[in-house]
């Protein structure tokens, strides 16, 4: 655990804004395809099902059960961890997702914050006490 704490204190190991944006776009395209197919199949309930799929996707993959990496994050070797170096629980990952929602709803200022923060944390990272690291 001490090595994880050392790695998280080095800002060169933390993933910056643009690489995280591109990783998120990969996830968004993947989710759009899944949601489009579900919308065709479930027509009336497609919107609710799409939201549930999105929440489940991010919460599972950000948590320790999903390895702390979404598909987009895996492409770039990124991983989300707690600030103490441990993996996220399902609950902590859900809190991070709610924080991401808040970050986007505030004109995406909470997401853009990553570009200017010394620890490369967006509001959602600060809310959930997480870092996104480059492997």
Image (cartoon, rainbow, N blue to C red):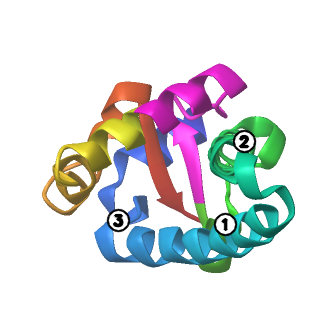
- Left or right: residue 95 compared with residue 68: left
Q: How crowded is mark 2: few (under 14 residues within 10 Å), some or many (20 or more)?
A: some
Q: Residues within 10 Å of mark 3 (few under 14, many from 20)?
A: few
Question: In the image shown, does 53 or 88 lie closer to the viewer?
Answer: 53
Secondary element type, mark 1:
helix
Residue 44 on image: x %, y %: 72, 50
Q: How far apart are marks 2 and 3 (CA)?
A: 30 Å
Residue 66 on image: x %, y %: 79, 47
Q: Residue 41 carries which label?
A: none
- Looking at the rendered image, the disc whose residue lies closer to the viewer, 3 or 1, is 1
- Left or right: residue 100 compared with residue 41: left
Dividing the picture into quarters, in which one does residue 31 lie?
bottom right
Q: Residue 31 carries which label?
A: 1
Please report contact status of discs 1 and 2: CB closer than 8 Å, yes or no: no
Q: Circle 3 is placed at which residue position?
A: 12
Q: What stretch is highlighted in magenta?
A: 79-98
Residue 94 higher or lower than 25, as above or below = above
Q: Is residue 32 visible?
A: yes
For the C terminus, which image quadrant?
bottom right
| Farthest residue, direction front | 44
Q: Which of marks 2 and 3 is nearer the N terminus?
A: 3
């Amino acid at each position: 655990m001490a090595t994880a704490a050392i790695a998280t204190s080095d800002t060169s190991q933390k993933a910056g804004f643009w690489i995280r944006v591109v990783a998120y776009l990969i996830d968004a395209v993947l989710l759009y395809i899944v949601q489009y197919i579900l919308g065709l199949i479930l027509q009336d309930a497609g919107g609710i099902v799409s939201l549930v799929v999105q929440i489940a996707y991010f919460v599972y993959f950000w948590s320790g059960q999903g390895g702390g990496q979404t598909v987009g994050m895996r492409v770039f070797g990124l991983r989300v961890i707690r600030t103490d170096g441990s993996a996220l629980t399902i609950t902590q990952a859900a809190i991070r997702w709610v924080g991401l929602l808040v970050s986007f709803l505030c004109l995406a200022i909470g997401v853009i914050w990553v570009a200017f923060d010394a620890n490369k944390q967006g509001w959602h990272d600060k809310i959930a006490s997480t870092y996104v690291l480059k492997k």
